[in-house]
Image (cartoon, rainbow, N blue to C red):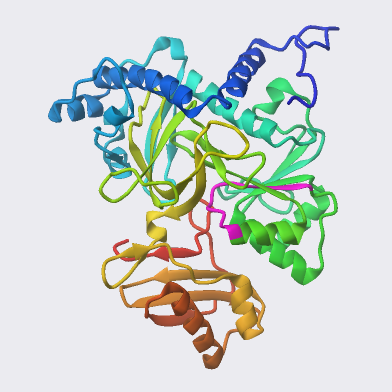
Amino acid sequence: MLAQPPISNVQSLLFPAFPSLQAMQQMALQFQLGESQWWPQELLETHQFRQLGQLLAHAQQTVPFYRDLFAAGDISLPETIDRSFLETLPVVHRSDLQLDPAQFLSTAPPKEHGPVAFAMTSGSTGRPIRFGRSAATQALWGAFALRDLLWHPRDWSGKLCTIRWFHRGVAEAPDGISHPSWGGITDQLFKSGPSAVLNVNSTLEDQMAWLQREKPDFIVSYASNLQALTAYAARHGLVLPRLRELRTVGETVTPEARRRLSEAWQVEIVDCYSCEESGYLALQCPDHDHYHIQGESVIVEILDDNDRPCPVGVVGRIVLTNLNNFVTPLIRYEIGDYGELAEACPCGRGLPVLKRVHGRTRNRLILPSGENIFPNFGDHGQITALTGVPLYQFQFLQHSLERLEVKLVMERPLDSREQAKVAEVMLRNVGHSFEVVFSFPAEIPRGPNGKFEEFKCLIGS
């Protein structure tokens, strides 16, 4: 529901408004998305696979990687594309795109899709990927960003503060960068309040001081950073009285993290799941904590290690097919994340439901037997309860099949007896015995992209 009329591009005609051409395009897309979100799954899939047929034909004819892949596998496109045919296609791995990005570029992207722009991302792997996208793809990316804003209505006049990764020297403390509006897609359509951004490389002290000066109504940041800010604010008795919502991006948000943030700040937590290569993959349901896959733009599969579909409730590899990028088509592309599907949502939307994103491949613990699992080491509160020592941050690293390192940023280092208690509970949670070594750094730095992972398997890295 629109909280206000859009900005009118015709003087003196404010309501109903006459938006600009670009804004009208976005409103037309929102009208379609507003209808298709309620379609039954069968109708949604009908249109998904019609669109997939267009993409597959284009990829086979103009994209060297897929032309060679289909020829090598003697794959011919049937007249009607359906899920069973999609599941016969080989899974494409991130390493394929990293190895030779040029092979994924179309030699003849459709001119009617508009100008082509190129981008690059290293994700959380540190290995850059270059890809292209058209103006049409960018417009759809904006449409799903706007859908997210409309699903979770906000007072547009409020102040938005964002703490994210930027290169050194950009949006640094103490001032960050201020803007007169929220920017992005909102500026095309609506009047909004001011916004400000700060580099996440800033210290917690500088971040909290900045937030107290800026007085935000809404904060966008990584879940790990918001948790660290929560702990810092609690230690120093600091509050943000105007805060109404926390928006988490870029990292896995566990149920425990969601609960802890909600209780600490007494606000709603809204998350989304996206990637640079494909845009918005899933948005949090307006009525529940799980996510709706953005089926108008992407087909998401959850596959086991043998590339078979996982049933609802079973964790598997996330494989996506972007339906609208004809510049760098990504068809059955394994992004490197693990997720879990859920049953249809009680809200009534027919969009598929992603119960949870569990993390990346390197967030899985490798057991001596060769099995790998997503580990449960406990949480901040459990370690503090065991030792009586406030815990500010932790990270677990697997160095070998026998050895785990526990990094704890605490009020003081733990003695040997306290370390033994933490190790005992941690290994009981995991269900396997490892050698556990402890370290107590003053802080744990973030990765090169500003994100933070509480567990990383370093075997083979």
Q: Relative to residue 143, is residue 159 drawn left or right?
A: right
294 w.r.t. 266: above or below: above
Vertical placement of 385 versus 121: above or below? Answer: below
Q: Quadrant of the N terminus?
A: top right
The question of residue 250 being in magenta is answered with yes
- Tell me the magenta residue range: 244-255
Q: In the image, 235: left or right of 185?
A: right
Q: Assess whether residue 315 is covered by the magenta stretch.
A: no
As drawn, 272 above or below 227: above
The image quadrant of residue 96 is: top left
Would you place residue 268 above or below residue 322 in this image? below
Q: Position of residue 32 (x, y in %)?
A: 58, 18
Q: Quadrant of residue 387?
A: bottom right
Is residue 203 visible in the rendered structure shown here?
no
Q: Position of residue 184 (x, y in %)?
A: 65, 29
221 or 121, which is in the foreground? 221
Q: Provide residue 410's location: percent of width, then percent of height.
A: 62, 77
Question: In the rendered view, does 451 fall on the left or right side of 319?
Answer: right
Residue drawn 75% across and 10% down?
Answer: 9
**Which residue is rendered at x = 49% and y = 57% of the image?**
447
Which x, y percent locates residue 412? 63, 83
Residue 424 in sight here:
yes
- Quick check: 63 left or right of 284? left
